Image: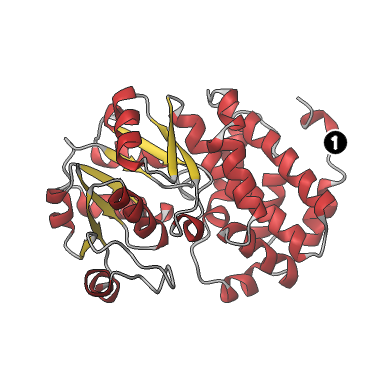
Amino acid sequence: MSRVSVLGSGAWGTTLSQVLADAGHEVLVWGRNVAVVKEINDDHTNHSFLPGAQLPSSIKATTNVSEAFDFGDALVLAIPAQTLRENLLAWKSTFPLSKPIISTLKGIEAETHSRMTEIVVNELGASLENIGLITGPNLAAEMILRQPAGAVAASINADVSELIINLFTTPYFRVYPSSDLVGCELAGATKSVIALAVGMAVGLDLGENTQSMIITRGLSEVARFGQAYGADPLTNLGLAGMGDLVASCGSGLSRNRTFGEVLGRTGSIEQTRAQVAKTVEGVASAPAILELAHRVGVEVPIIEAVADVVSGNITPRQALDRLMTVPLEGEIK
């Protein structure tokens, strides 16, 4: 049994805390929201993020990040991707770099176009050998019900991958190792943008043919993009790639897909932001991923169309129309 601190008390952090507790570990959740922390401690629930879920009574919570740093033998990052840098800057002086750091974040930082593990290394001075990632087709609303699911533990350090597997494996959650940290991170970020595109198609009342075209061509974009940055092509055929893409594009539980649906119906990014208050990583990441793709000369027409929509340059209908006229040369490589 290990002691694990989960930094983040939202839906994903709370769900992973349950997985860790079910695996037999002591878990301390850190969060800023006093009411949420009190609810986890007193009622063993988190109705704001996971309505109806009853958490293991062994899970404890705190608003004191120093307590969380001291408690865990390993630290799990489960905060919104676009807030990672500011949080690390605030924690830098007390963050325990000797402990393994496990990222669960899926996104590319909007301003710097950085991957999440790059931010951890740059801001904390942490060694990449001490950092891992857990990723895959993991929708919190299903995992909190303990439905069977799988994930990937990625790190350049096999010992860290093995640690993640040991921490998170339960009878309903199976974790596979990978050494392709870059590929897994890029796949997790780009799938959110493709899910936005699928959601827009649904919101425009377009059917399975359209959605299937976006998913399969989107997978091709994800694969070409990742390979240009040194990713293993096989990563995109596994849970971190295709698995995560299918779950995010096909489920109404996916924040990116549901945001895209509202965007398709309203035709306006401003109206959609007003209606959907939840964090949607694909919206922030799309322009950054497009810039990264352009840097290595990779054509990503779906990602480019979504980036233009979330930037307010075109409507979802115009985006779908444009995708049907893209020259094939850039897409068939």
Determine the residue positioned at 77% across, 51% down: 211
Determine the residue positioned at 27% across, 69% down: 40
Q: Nearer the viewer, residue 19 or 82?
A: 19
Q: Nearer the viewer, residue 321 or 54?
A: 54
Expressed as whole percent of the image width and height from the top left, the position of residue 281 reads 51, 55
Colour logic: secondary structure
Residue under pointer 1: 327
Expressed as whole percent of the image width and height from the top left, the position of residue 128 reads 31, 29
The furthest residue to the front: 171
Q: In which quadrant is the C terminus drawn?
A: top right
Above or below residue 317? Residue 84 is: above
Q: In which quadrant is the N terminus drawn?
A: top left
In-image side of 44 versus 311 (left or right): left
Task: Using a 10 Å C-alpha cutoff, classify the residue at mark 1 as few (fewer than 14 neighbours), some (14 to 19) or many (20 or more).
Answer: few
Count of number-bearing discs: 1
In-image side of 43 versus 264 (left or right): left
Determine the residue positioned at 75% across, 46% down: 214
| Element class at badge 1 | loop
User: Is any atom of residue 314 visible in this view?
Assistant: no
In-image side of 31 versus 106 (left or right): left
Above or below residue 128? Residue 40 is: below
In-image side of 218 versus 171 (left or right): right
Expressed as whole percent of the image width and height from the top left, the position of residue 18 reads 34, 55
Q: Amino acid at mark 1?
A: Pro
Determine the residue positioned at 33% across, 36% down: 164
Expressed as whole percent of the image width and height from the top left, the position of residue 255 reads 56, 61
User: Is any atom of residue 261 visible in this view?
Assistant: yes
Above or below residue 86? Residue 171 is: above
